[in-house]
Image: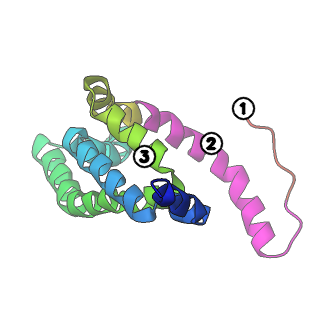
Amino acid sequence: MKHMPLLALLALPLPLLAETREERVAVATEYVDLALQSFDLTAVIETMYQPILQQVAAGGQVLADDQVAQIRQLYLDTFTQPMTSLMRDQAQIMADLMTLGEITALRDFYATPEGRSVLAKLPQLTAAQQPAVMQLVNDRMGTLMPQVLAIINGEAPPAPTAQP
């Protein structure tokens, strides 16, 4: 008789013993909350308009400090709330893509001093890579777009040209 609860538990189908989406969402929400505490969203947003400033400067135009400040504020006003919402929505996506163990490991890592430090440095990593990514995209678009358009139009794509 004392083994009856254990036998009843073992008789349940395996999916009922598995983790639930609600459990994954709950832990993912904890992860997102931790991430938002340590993540410098302002720094991320500031990387978004830097290519524009660089392009303006490359064109020979010098912007005054107040113009740069206005652009910065425009980007912050435009993107802070929507990006925060997108980050909060990440919990639902994580729950669909990851296991409870994976989400728990992320949450636990970002709760450590090292994890918080990594989160704080992610905007700097993005900013450091962004010029190279933009250059790569710009270098490839001239060759890529005619091929994409040919595919869309049902034509044979032109032969790719050698890349530098």
At x 32% / y 29%, what residue is drawn? 115
Tell me if residue 161 is in the magenta stretch: no
The quarter in which the C terminus is drawn is: top right
Please tell me whether the stretch drawn in magenta is mainly helix, strand or loop.
helix
Residue at mark 3 to residue at mark 2: CA–CA distance = 37 Å
Q: Are marks 2 and 1 in contact (CB under 8 Å)?
A: yes
Q: Residues within 10 Å of mark 3 (few under 14, many from 20)?
A: many
At x 80% / y 38%, what residue is drawn? 162
Kindly state the secondary structure of the residue where label 3 is placed: helix
Q: Where's residue 37, x and y in %?
A: 19, 43
Outermost residue, top side: 114
Q: Which residue is mark 1?
A: 164
Return the disc, 2 or 1, that comes first in the chain's sequence: 2
Q: Residues within 10 Å of mark 1 (few under 14, many from 20)?
A: few
Residue at mark 2 to residue at mark 1: CA–CA distance = 9 Å
Q: From the viewer's side, name the closer residue of 51 and 34.
A: 34
Q: How many marks?
A: 3
Looking at the rendered structure, the kind of residue marked 2 is Asp
Residue 46 seen: no
Q: Which residue is mark 3?
A: 103
Return the disc, 1 or 3, that comes first in the chain's sequence: 3
User: Could you say which quadrant of the image residue 122 lies in?
Assistant: top left
Judged by depth in the image, the label closer to the viewer, 3 or 2, is 3
Q: Which residue is mark 2?
A: 139
Kindly state the secondary structure of the residue where label 1 is placed: loop
Residue 151 seen: yes
Q: Are marks 1 and 3 in contact (CB under 8 Å)?
A: no
Q: Where's residue 157, x and y in %?
A: 85, 62
Q: Where's residue 53, x and y in %?
A: 31, 44
Q: Which residues are magenta?
A: 128-157
Looking at the rendered structure, the kind of residue marked 1 is Pro
